[in-house]
Structures are given as C-alpha cells and as structure tokens.
Image (cartoon, rainbow, N blue to C red):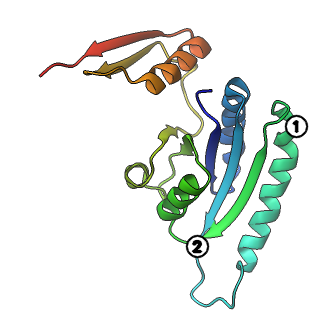
Amino acid sequence: RLFNNILIPLNLRRQDTGTVERAMQMAIQFNCDVHLLHVGKKPLLQLGGLSGKSVSHKVQLYRMREKYAPMLAKGCMLHAHVTEGNPETMIAEYATIHHIDLVLAEKPASLDINKLASKTNCAILSLVPNPVFNGIKNIVLPVGSYLPLRRILMATYLSKKFNAAIHLIALTR
C-alpha cells in the first residue's frame, strides 16, 4: 500500500469538516488508517492532565470519529487524539510514534508547514481551505538519478482523481 496511516491535524473549526472529508476520500482510496489530531495551547498553570478546553476538544474529536469511522474499509481505523504544546513539535512527535506516511494539513496561519516538514519523515500535503479549483490539469514531478516512487504513486492517484496529465522532468547537473 502507498499509505498505511494518514494524519490530519485539526484546529476544530467549521472548515475542518471539509479537510476531514477530503482526507476520508483519500483514506478510502488507499485503504488506510486515519488519525485526527488536535494540538491545543498549553495553559500557563495546569495541575496535570489536559486543560478543560482540551477535554471539550476531545469530545468534538470523538464525535467526528463516530461520524466518519463507518466510511472506512473493514479493518481500517479512525483514531482521535488531543494533546497540548507546540503544534509543529507535537505533530512531528505523533507522526513518528504512529508511523504516519502522510500529513494532510489545511494551511492555517498558526501552523508553519515548512517547520513541520523539517521535523517529520513523511510526506506533507498542504490543503487550501475552500479550494476555488475543481481539478488539477497538470502534475509536474522533477526526477534525478532515482525515480521517486512514492511521489509517482501519489501523482498517479491525483491524476486519476482529476483526470490530469503527469509530466516527469529530468534534472541533470
């Protein structure tokens, strides 16, 4: 399988449902597990466990899990987790611990995709909230002395979904 685990970091806003629905479509296509993760701000003073706000976020995530889990193929799971701290650090730690293959992150101002990419060992797909396009026409993949097989598989998935052309561009020195 191309992906075994997809991670979706969430801010728990209304727009998140669109991100989760797009991720669920990919998870169904790839027959993989999905992880929903919310990283809240750590309060200045806390006596242990999660803050009250994070507990309510946990309830929201569990409701999302109940709603979307039945969409997945038999044997695939939808996990939900809430933690507190620096978003990029916590997402990277979660991705490492749970062997995440792909992070699907909506590009909010609070999440630095470049920092996240430097801290993880997996692919990151930055989603645009409320996309204004209905498809992708061309996918350009630079290739060097090796073929980036996982990127080609991802490009193949996107090209099938949007009826797009894939262009492999050879890079030489």
Amino acid of disc 1: Pro
Residue at image location 72% in from the left, 36% down from the top: 21
- Residue 2 coordinates in the image, percent (x, y): 58, 27
Front of the two marks 1 and 2: 1
Question: Viewed as shown, does residue 128 lie left or right of 5?
Answer: left
**Element type where label 2 sits in the image:** loop
**Element type where label 1 sits in the image:** helix
Few, some or many C-alpha atoms within 10 Å of disc 1 (few <14, some 14-19, many ≥20)? few
Q: Is residue 164 above or below residue 10?
A: above
Cβ atoms at labels 1 and 2 below 8 Å apart: no
Depth check, front residue: 134 or 8: 8
Q: Which mark is residue 70?
A: 1
For the C terminus, give its image quadrant. Answer: top left
- Residue 171 coordinates in the image, percent (x, y): 21, 19
Residue at image location 56% in from the left, 52% down from the top: 95
Few, some or many C-alpha atoms within 10 Å of disc 2 (few <14, some 14-19, many ≥20)? some
Distance between the alpha carbons at the discs numbered 1 and 2? 31 Å
Depth check, front residue: 165 or 94: 94
Which residue position is annotated with label 2?
41
**Residue 119 placement: quadrant:** bottom left
Toward the left, the furthest residue is 173
Residue at image location 82% in from the left, 49% down from the top: 65
Amino acid of disc 2: Lys
Question: Viewed as shown, does residue 71 lie left or right of 4?
Answer: right
**Residue 146 placement: quadrant:** top left
For the N terminus, give its image quadrant. Answer: top right
- Residue 42 coordinates in the image, percent (x, y): 58, 78
